[in-house]
Image: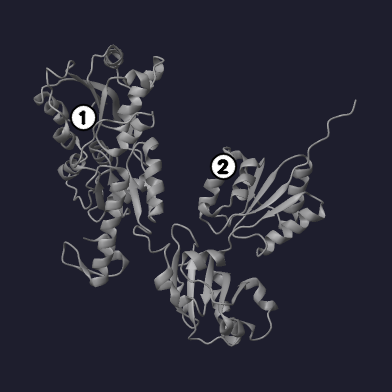
Amino acid sequence: MTSARKLVGRVRFVGTGPGDPGLLTKRALDAIREADRVYYDRSLPQSLIEAAKELTGDEGKLKLIESSPSDQGKLMAAAAREGENIARLIVGDAYPNRLAKIEIRAASAEEARFEVIPGMSHAQAVAVYAGMPPGEVRTVIDIDDIASLEPFALADAVKRGSLTVTADVSDLSSLRDILLAGGVSGETAVAVTGDATGETEYTTTSSVDTFVEAALGYAGQVVLTIGPGVEDRLELAWWESRPLYGWKVLIPRTKEQSGVMSERLRAYGAIPCEVPTIAVEPPRTPAQMERSIKGLVDGRYAWIVFTSQNSVKAIWEKFKEHGLDARAFGGLRIACIGEATANAVREFGIEPELLPSGQQSSEGLLEVFPPHDPILDMVGRVLLPRADIATETLVSGLTERGWEVDDVTAYRTVRASPPAAEIRDAIKSGGFDAVLFTSSSTVRNLVGIAGKPHQRTVVACIGPATSDTAIEFGLRVDAKPDNASVPDLIESLAEYAVELKQRLAEGPIKTRRGQKVQGPTALRFR
């Protein structure tokens, strides 16, 4: 009887791109998911580390490299021989990276099975994201490779097209001297880009003579674009031109609800910060909800009105508890406040009969809600499952229209624990550019656990009731959408930001104390 043959693993050198997890290729994603161990070095951006944690589902698989490149290559080769699949994450592309090439050679010398998965380089990313496409000829070099160039090769490269150099900020003074000594004119246009494709990517344009001073404040690796292509930036740059680019936006919501908002904010260029201020819990006593579910099955109700996604979730969880499905809604008419709530209902294969045609609020729903007709409506009762702290507007409005209302507590909203001290300080000192409120309870609870946002923080509210609560707490509401939905809320904030930037371009903005403020700081003042 022969013993089972031991499987041999592979070492995959994964080019991760410059920092934006969205640039990971499918092959790179598969390599990380399938890895038994994931190695990375200190140059890997935090955004890619977080993406790797999500892909592996086990933070313990990620290992920070502390050994030399040659020793690391041998270590990974040995692990592969023992049957482990290894993913070695490399910033940008693998082969332009001098240290990565040492690891690859070491793994190859150990006869390891290895793959090299290409990634977008810093030079490629800057050309696309910062809006500086190369001309007919582009020369890409790393500052470590400059010493091997022929004299005046740099000047010749600039004459023929764009020259792109990746370098550490500590080497910029030396690079300027090398460029000038290599015959490149001091007046040649230079763009310096830091944190390429990251949330804080920033590009300054200057010249060979002045780019060192223009890059003050940069850290880590930067990309210099020299010569033709720099002038295209004003027309073609898009990453840094998004409406909320660089805005730090506070999201005071339940943890379960904040993910969708964060994704959409990032698409607009913002840096979201999720601070849970409320938690959703079941009602203290289940009796009301139990009677309501029985009433639904027995045909006690003509309508059910959903005021939030949480109310939909609460009813559906009760359905599952009792072994019910969407058929229990048969013969029942469904009304929703807002598209987000309607979409939650649609997820269960049901189309709501009624939504507000105008204002997405209790008032908007009441405008279109039919009065009870005792002849046509054999059943005259409405089920209203909602939060324990909801207003009476909807109940009184439905009652005025002749309906009997079972106002049932489907869930409770409770205040979350205070955020970390640095978050509280940022809220009160103006460290956030904007805050998004999606309900009255988020306003009350944020102020309760962290204090009022600073007066220069832009306040955006999802609807009239939320705006009224914010005003009651002494906040100025800057942005409010016509439709009460998360996409519309973020769009209204983006429109406000564009308007603010246009005002800034026209001249100084006056603060409330009469001071004139110019530059990026002015975006924080109204």
Q: Residue, x 50% and y 79% (percent of image)?
A: 228
Helix, strand or loop for disc 2: helix
User: Taking 509 as reference, is 2 left or right?
Assistant: right
Indicate whether 467 appears above or below 174.
above
* Residue 325, percent from left and from top: 39, 20
All told, the count of numbered labels is: 2
- Looking at the picture, tell me which residue is in the foreground, 61 or 398: 398
Q: Is residue 218 left or right of residue 42?
A: left
Residue found at x 29% / y 29%: 413
Does dot 1 land on a helix, a strand or a loop? loop
| Residue 41 in sight here | yes
Q: Which residue is mark 2?
A: 55
Dot 1 or dot 2, earlier in sequence: 2
- Of the 4 image quadrants, the one containing the C terminus is bottom left
Q: In the rendered image of this protein, does residue 470 appear above or below residue 303?
A: below
For mark 2, does the 10 Å Cα neighbourhood hold few (<14), some (14 to 19), or many (20 or more) residues?
some
Q: Spatial distance from mark 1 to mark 2, Cα to Cα?
A: 39 Å
Residue type of the residue flagged with mark 2 = Leu
Residue that carries the numbered disc 1 in the rendered image: 390
Q: Is residue 285 visible?
A: no
Instruction: Report the front residue among 50 and 3.
Output: 3
Residue 525: image location, x then y, percent: 24, 61
Measured as percent of width and height from the top left, residue 179 is found at 57, 82
Q: Are marks 1 and 2 in contact (CB under 8 Å)?
A: no
**125 relative to 376, above or below:** below
In the image, residue 26 sits, relative to residue 511, either above or below, namely above
